[in-house]
Image (cartoon, rainbow, N blue to C red):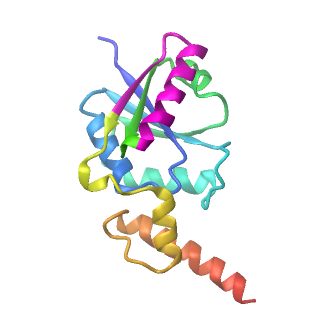
Amino acid sequence: MARHIAVYPGTFDPITRGHLDVIARGLKLFDGLIIAVAESTTKRTLFSVEERVEMIKGEIKKYSNVKVESFNCLLVDYLKKKKTKTILRGLRVVSDFEHEFQMALTNRKLDPQIETVFMMTAENYAPISSRFVKEIAMLGGDLRAFVTPGVARRLKEKFRKSRSRADV
């Protein structure tokens, strides 16, 4: 029987409890996942692509059927390289849907065989966005509800370094 692998793409800057929820629940639908960390993005990232891949690998150790890779091409081309036709995307709030829907239609226009599966995040993770997490971390707030202890430590280290440089 053929294994059905989905690609879960994103910047994951940083990976949040919401992302981890989508991964765990996505594994109930698919035989495996490839977490595809976008190298080239219009977003300015706090962590390098190598740091983001390393962080995610640390968070998904318990899953033998999840791989983490970076990519720097059109998502549809990446899916072709991986020989899969399925994209997994998480939705937090209704406002996410419009953007995600446009991306899904664009990907389908580029490759009509591509399917995007949308998964609503668990309600307790709906308010979590990487942007808010970085802002909370920068201001020294409590991150426990939003990210794992390992990710919180990395965020604190990153902002401690940037504050140290600013003090010079």
In which quadrant is the N terminus drawn? top left
Q: Position of residue 139 (x, y in %)?
A: 50, 79
Q: Nearer the viewer, residue 130 or 95?
A: 95
Q: Position of residue 76 (x, y in %)?
A: 58, 22
State left or right for residue 147 relative to residue 110: left
Q: Nearer the viewer, residue 151 or 126?
A: 126
Quarter of the rendering containing residue 142: bottom left
Q: Nearer the viewer, residue 5 or 155?
A: 155
Chain part drawn in magenta: 95-118
Q: Nearer the viewer, residue 106 or 143?
A: 106
**Extreme residue in the right direction:** 168
Q: Residue at x 58, y 72 (%)?
A: 158
Q: Residue at x 57, y 76 (%)?
A: 159
**Extreme residue in the bottom direction:** 167
Q: Position of residue 35 (x, y in %)?
A: 46, 39
Q: Position of residue 131 (x, y in %)?
A: 51, 59
Number of marks drawn: 0
Q: Is residue 116 above or below residue 37?
A: above
Q: Residue at x 35, y 57 (%)?
A: 127
Q: Residue at x 37, y 41 (%)?
A: 94
State left or right for residue 31 relative to residue 86: left
Quarter of the rendering containing residue 69: top right
Residue 63: in sight, yes or no? no
Q: Is residue 85 above or below residue 68?
A: above
Which SS does the magenta portion mostly show?
Answer: helix
Is 109 in the magenta? yes
Q: Is residue 83 above or below residue 39?
A: above
In which quadrant is the C terminus drawn? bottom right
Residue 71: in sight, yes or no? yes
